[in-house]
Image (cartoon, coloured by chain):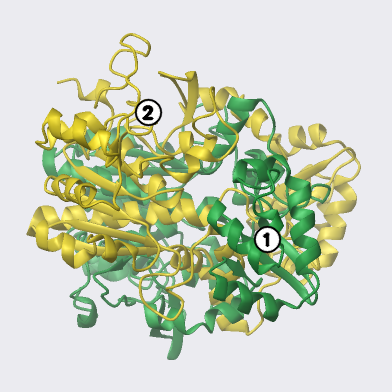
């Protein structure tokens, strides 16, 4: 067995029944799939996961960029859960599942017959993961969970932006994505426990809890000082100088996170006379004299261009960065060298790229085993595996209980690209 | 485990795992704190000077900064001078007892300390060795010094954050540091699973660069598919509309219309039923195409009434909306006490609060087993566990190689 060639797949043999949609659930199940799990994505017949319809689109416009970015290495089964047959299909798939993942609005999953107790009765030892906006209990549990709503409601937006400015959204849905990661951590922990005891678990993650965890140190500051943290533009309330400065031509970020780096900055920027000034010597001094420190450093940095400062500060070992646009970053040789971008062939859209799971194990390359599935692409395969007959499946296709994706002509993708890994 | 019997029913699947924690600041300590929350025994190695830099960042609890206190519960602290041969010998002795080693030094430092992954893994093939870094341990940028802020700028996250014409904004909750810690924890958990089955250890790498790039996965996908650069949109979203902040009579409200059903509900609530079937606005794709018009119509409608009016109306209609909260208001939400996300514990003789591990398991309570350690608080007991005699320990302390006891 060439484990090296296969990559790091410690979840091989683990089956995930994935009833999540949009971003948090799919981020979780894509991580599990990247680690080797067999993920069966159950989608509604018709348009499937909402994000398939969100622009911009690849190729013929069937699947949006967000969908493509979080659904690799999964198989898609399109089933109408409003029909009794559709629910029986999911029940049957449950019989071989290790993990059940759902992210419906409060109450919906119970109505469908797949609440935790119902699922556990049919499949003891299941690890059941419920992803929601505010958790499944408590006074706010009925509220819908959208990333941006939670950014506002949780106070994250209250500390992001310029003083007095408009509310600013962190534009990469950190709560959705990181809630998916918390689900992964809970699942991996519960799998180890199940390996030892045979017992399953009911795991709850929510955007709200994730936001709280992100705000843990801001909360600690509030509890200690009674002063709510405020919007600070690019600055940091506990570190100085640690923000954007205007150089001669554009902005540059400067990150002085220790007193050693302060000494280096002073040497590199011609501020030697101030290195040991008692107003600036330690970080606590500089935070106390925030405005004066920023003025002192700002006056220096204005005198040269970003490129000049990047060269000077990098040589001196002082953390700094220009504000790069996304496409510049993607083109960095470092990104290619680290295997962060995975190119692959999609049977419908041709050559596509994907961003790797951000952990590398044993220095191995990370690869796309299966492209993001077309809606219902694997309905037939998965139902046959589950013991249903071709006749049954044909009947259900006819009655729209299930939908099957277009078969991709053989040879149109790379070998093995649409089969199960 | 015995420290707090109240948590014995919680999920502690790592209660047989010893983690040697050679990290400081945010990303590494977040990773090891969550491993500790799951039951691992975490030994935090600090220098004999001021220790973890975050002990030194205001505001303070006793001698320790709030950020330090927030991410170092359930760990023990040993303070060693790793510039001395004896200190290095001690850390190697601790590494030999560990199942997991997590380090976040600058690239190259583990070689100087005599604990590079290649050597330690050759000595103990079961060891799971995790490196957390800014740019990764290999590649042209591996040696660049890195902080959260630097990576927010460098990776393009800042290029998509903020108002279209505004200055660069920092996302204030350090998402890259914190999420890199989370990714490292997932990698370690996955590696523990493989080790349980095969006996094989692993070298796990997480970095702020990889985390940032992963956060930007769909922005990258959009760029690859369309060749159009994502731009700053304030609070708005490039693929959904209307999904942003609007000005109301007395402030701002966030409205998130994530489906065409919600669009219909919003049109009714705003008293503009004609809009729902207008071909310019019918589907999300239509509204994204007519972005400015959609936003202008909603804006005109909502500015006429105050926040409270709209929140009540939208809640009744099932339309996702929110005020822009501040953290103090958030922390007073009963939801948080009820869900157990705020934990209470005693530290330095006073009542303290902490934010819990954000995964609820079988609805079990989460609790602080150990307060964040004082600097070098556990130096003696950890050295004794590693086989040092009382005389050795006294000598190491006398020579300043092993650290001070805690400073109350």
Chain containing the residue with disc 1? B
Tell me residue A43's x, y (percent).
35, 43
Q: Is residue A119 above or below residue A311?
A: below
Q: Which residue is mark 1?
A: B273
Chain drawn green, letter? B
Assign a secondary structure to mark 1: helix
Q: Which class describes the residues within 10 Å of circle 2: few (<14), some (14-19), or many (20+)?
A: many
Q: As drawn, is A173 to the left or to the right of A403?
A: right
Q: Quadrant of the N terminus of chain A?
A: top left
Q: Nearer the viewer, residue B49 or B260?
A: B260
Residue at 43% in and 52% down: A24
Q: Nearer the viewer, mark 1 or mark 2?
A: 1
Q: Nearer the viewer, residue A324 or B322?
A: B322
Quadrant in the rendering for residue A6: top left
Q: Which residue is mark 2?
A: A366
Chain drawn yellow, letter? A
Tell me residue A388's x, y (percent).
11, 36
Tell me residue B408's x, y (percent).
46, 83
């Amino acid at each position: 067995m060439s484990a090296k060639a296969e990559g790091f797949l410690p979840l091989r043999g683990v089956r995930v029944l994935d009833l999540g949609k949009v971003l948090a659930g799919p981020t979780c199940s894509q991580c599990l799939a990247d680690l080797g799990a067999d993920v069966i994505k159950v989608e509604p017949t018709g348009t499937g996961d909402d994000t398939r319809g969100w622009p911009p689109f690849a190729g013929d416009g069937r699947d949006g960029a967000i969908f493509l970015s979080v659904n690799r290495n999964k198989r898609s089964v399109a089933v109408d859960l409003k029909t009794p047959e559709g629910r029986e299909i999911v029940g049957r798939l449950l019989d071989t599942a290790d993990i059940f993942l759902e992210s419906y609005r409060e109450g919906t999953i119970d109505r469908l017959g797949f609440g935790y107790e119902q699922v556990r009765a049919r499949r003891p030892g299941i690890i059941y993961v419920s992803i929601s906006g505010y958790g499944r209990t408590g006074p706010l549990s009925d509220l819908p969970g959208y990333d941006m709503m939670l950014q506002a409601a949780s106070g994250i937006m209250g500390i992001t932006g310029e003083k007095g400015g408009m509310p600013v959204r962190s534009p990469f849905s950190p709560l959705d994505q990181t809630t998916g990661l918390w689900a992964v951590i809970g699942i991996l922990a519960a799998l180890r426990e199940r390996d030892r005891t045979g017992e399953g678990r009911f795991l709850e993650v929510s955007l709200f809890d994730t936001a709280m965890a992100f705000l843990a140190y801001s909360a600690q500051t509030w509890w200690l000082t009674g002063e709510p943290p405020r919007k600070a533009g690019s600055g940091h309330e506990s570190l100085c100088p640690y923000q954007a400065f205007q150089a001669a031509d554009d902005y540059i970020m400067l990150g002085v996170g220790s007193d050693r780096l302060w000494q280096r900055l002073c040497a590199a920027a011609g501020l030697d006379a101030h290195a040991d000034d008692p107003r600036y010597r330690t970080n606590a001094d500089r935070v106390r004299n925030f405005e004066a420190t920023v003025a002192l450093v700002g006056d220096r940095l204005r005198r040269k261009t970003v490129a000049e400062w990047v060269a000077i500060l990098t040589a001196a070992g002082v953390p700094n960065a220009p504000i790069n646009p996304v496409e510049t970053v993607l083109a960095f040789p470092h990104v290619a060298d680290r295997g962060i971008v995975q190119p692959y062939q999609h049977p419908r859209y041709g050559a596509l790229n994907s961003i790797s799971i951000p952990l590398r194990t044993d220095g191995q390359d990370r690869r796309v085993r299966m492209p993001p599935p077309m809606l219902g692409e694997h309905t037939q395969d998965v139902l046959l595996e589950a013991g249903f007959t071709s006749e049954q499946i044909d009947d259900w296709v006819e009655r729209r209980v299930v939908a099957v994706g277009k078969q991709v002509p053989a040879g149109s993708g790379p070998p093995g690209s649409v089969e199960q890994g | 485990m015995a420290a707090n019997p109240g948590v014995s029913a919680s999920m502690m699947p790592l209660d047989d795992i010893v983690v040697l924690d050679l990290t400081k600041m945010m990303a590494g300590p977040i990773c090891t704190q969550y491993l500790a929350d799951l039951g691992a025994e975490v030994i935090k190695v600090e220098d004999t000077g001021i220790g973890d830099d975050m002990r030194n960042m205001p505001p303070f609890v006793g001698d320790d900064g709030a950020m330090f206190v927030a991410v170092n519960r359930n760990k023990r602290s040993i303070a060693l001078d790793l510039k001395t041969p004896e200190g290095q010998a001690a850390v190697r002795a601790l590494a030999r007892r560990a199942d997991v080693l997590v380090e976040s030094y600058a690239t190259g430092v583990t070689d100087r300390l005599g604990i590079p992954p290649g050597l330690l893994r050759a000595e103990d093939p079961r060891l799971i060795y995790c490196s957390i870094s800014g740019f990764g341990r290999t590649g042209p940028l591996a040696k660049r010094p890195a902080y959260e802020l630097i990576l927010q700028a460098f990776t393009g996250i800042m290029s998509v954050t903020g108002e279209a014409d505004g200055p660069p904004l920092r996302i204030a909750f350090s998402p890259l540091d914190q999420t890199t810690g989370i990714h490292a924890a997932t990698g370690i958990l996955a590696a523990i699973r493989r080790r349980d089955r095969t006996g094989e250890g692993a070298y796990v790498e997480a970095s702020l660069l990889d985390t940032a790039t992963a956060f930007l996965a769909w922005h990258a996908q959009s760029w690859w598919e369309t060749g159009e650069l994502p731009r700053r949109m304030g609070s708005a979203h490039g693929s959904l509309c209307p999904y942003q902040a609007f000005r109301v009579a007395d402030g701002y409200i966030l409205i998130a219309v994530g489906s065409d059903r919600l669009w219909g509900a919003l049109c009714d609530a705003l008293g503009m039923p004609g809009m729902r079937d207008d071909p310019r606005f019918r589907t999300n794709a239509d509204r994204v195409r007519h972005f400015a018009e959609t936003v202008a119509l909603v804006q005109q409608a909502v500015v006429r009434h105050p926040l409270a009016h709209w929140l009540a109306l939208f809640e009744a209609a099932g339309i996702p909306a929110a005020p822009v909260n501040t953290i103090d208001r958030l922390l007073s939400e009963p939801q948080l006490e009820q869900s157990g996300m705020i934990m209470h514990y005693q530290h330095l003789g006073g009542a303290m609060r902490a934010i819990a591990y954000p995964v609820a398991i079988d609805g079990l309570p989460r609790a602080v087993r150990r307060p964040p350690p004082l600097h070098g608080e556990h130096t003696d007991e950890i050295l004794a566990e590693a086989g040092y005699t009382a005389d050795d320990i006294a000598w190491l302390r006398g020579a300043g190689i092993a650290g001070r006891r805690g400073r109350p």
